[in-house]
Image (cartoon, grey):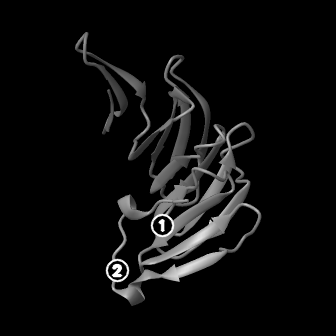
Amino acid sequence: MLYANDKGLRAFDLVKQTESTLSNQHATVIETNSFNEDILAIAGDSKICILDQRARNPICDATVNNPVTGFDWNPLVPYWCAIQSSTSISVHDVRVSLESPVRKYKESFLKTFTWSNSNCDLFLTSTMDQSVCLWGLGSNKWYSRVPFAKTGGSLTSSTLSFTK
């Protein structure tokens, strides 16, 4: 079991009842890579670290401009990730750098983010004003924007997903 506290990222072995430190970095976001569960992203404040649990060494780390509010691995490309702040999404190729995004998208008051599970280039965002945007890595602007606030609907992170 993994958890974060004021001492950093901790691992607790439920069978042996032992605890160990994986990282001393303050963590508010922990995300496991679905292609390899030993690879973790840890984010807190304006720092992000990609960590291999087995070696307990950072693969890469970076300081970003704004506090990290979310992180998501691309479900189709194991080395692509998205780092979310309250005003932007940056897409990174961790083989290259966490410092320099492949693409950066600015959007006011971001609330949620989700990758498409059928097209590696597409993702959705929702904003505090209850709008949903469809984005693609080939463009710096959203493809489509739906203002759900006008319909009286309400969006939460669990309601934002792609369907066929």
Judge the density around disc 2: few (<14), some (14-19), many (≥20) Cα neighbours within 10 Å: few
Judge the density around disc 1: few (<14), some (14-19), many (≥20) Cα neighbours within 10 Å: some
For badge 1, the amino acid type reads: Ser
Query: For this view, does 45 lie left or right of residue 142?
Result: left
For badge 2, the amino acid type reads: Gly
* Element type where label 1 sits in the image: loop
Dividing the picture into quarters, in which one does residue 137 lie? Answer: bottom right
Residue at the disc numbered 2: 153
Q: Which quarter of the rendered picture does the N terminus lie within?
A: top left
Q: Which mark is residue 86?
A: 1
For the view shown, which residue lies furthest in the bottom direction? 150
* Element type where label 2 sits in the image: loop
Looking at the rendered image, the disc whose residue lies closer to the viewer, 1 or 2, is: 2
- Give the camera-side residue of 104 and 72: 72
Q: Residue at x 51, y 60 (%)?
A: 163
**Disc nearer the start of the sequence (1/2):** 1
